[in-house]
Image (cartoon, grey):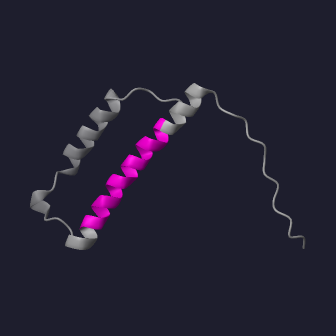
Amino acid sequence: MSQQPAPVPERQPLDELAAASVLAYAADQRAKVDVLASVLEDIAANGYPSPESGVLWETARDAHLARLADEQPRSA
């Protein structure tokens, strides 16, 4: 078997607006992952929060749906 590296497909460059959009999306996703990681780290260090201190899932769902409705549409 040959030890040649796998061929790398050619890439097509993005225009400036598309590249900026992709970078903004990546930053948004990174921020969300950072929040999730900090919550998991807190749970690992301190245990689960008590149910009395939490938010009902229906309330969290409704707030999230309201935020989604207010967001600007994105294109893939």
Residue 6, percent across and down? 81, 59
50 horizontally vs 9: left or right: left
Query: In this orientation, does residue 57 appear?
Result: yes
Q: What stretch is highlighted in magenta?
A: 24-42
Give 51 or 8, whichever is nearer the viewer. 8
Question: Overall secondary structure of the magenta stretch?
Answer: helix
At 30% from the left edge and 36% from the top edge, which residue is drawn?
65
Give 2 or 76, whichever is nearer the viewer. 2
Residue 66, percent across and down? 27, 33
Residue at the extreme right? 1
At 74% from the left edge and 40% from the top edge, which residue is drawn?
11
At 21% from the left edge and 68% from the top edge, which residue is drawn?
48
User: Where 52 sits versus 32, above or below?
Assistant: below
69 horizontally vs 52: left or right: right
Q: Quadrant of the N terminus?
A: bottom right
Quarter holding residue 60: top left
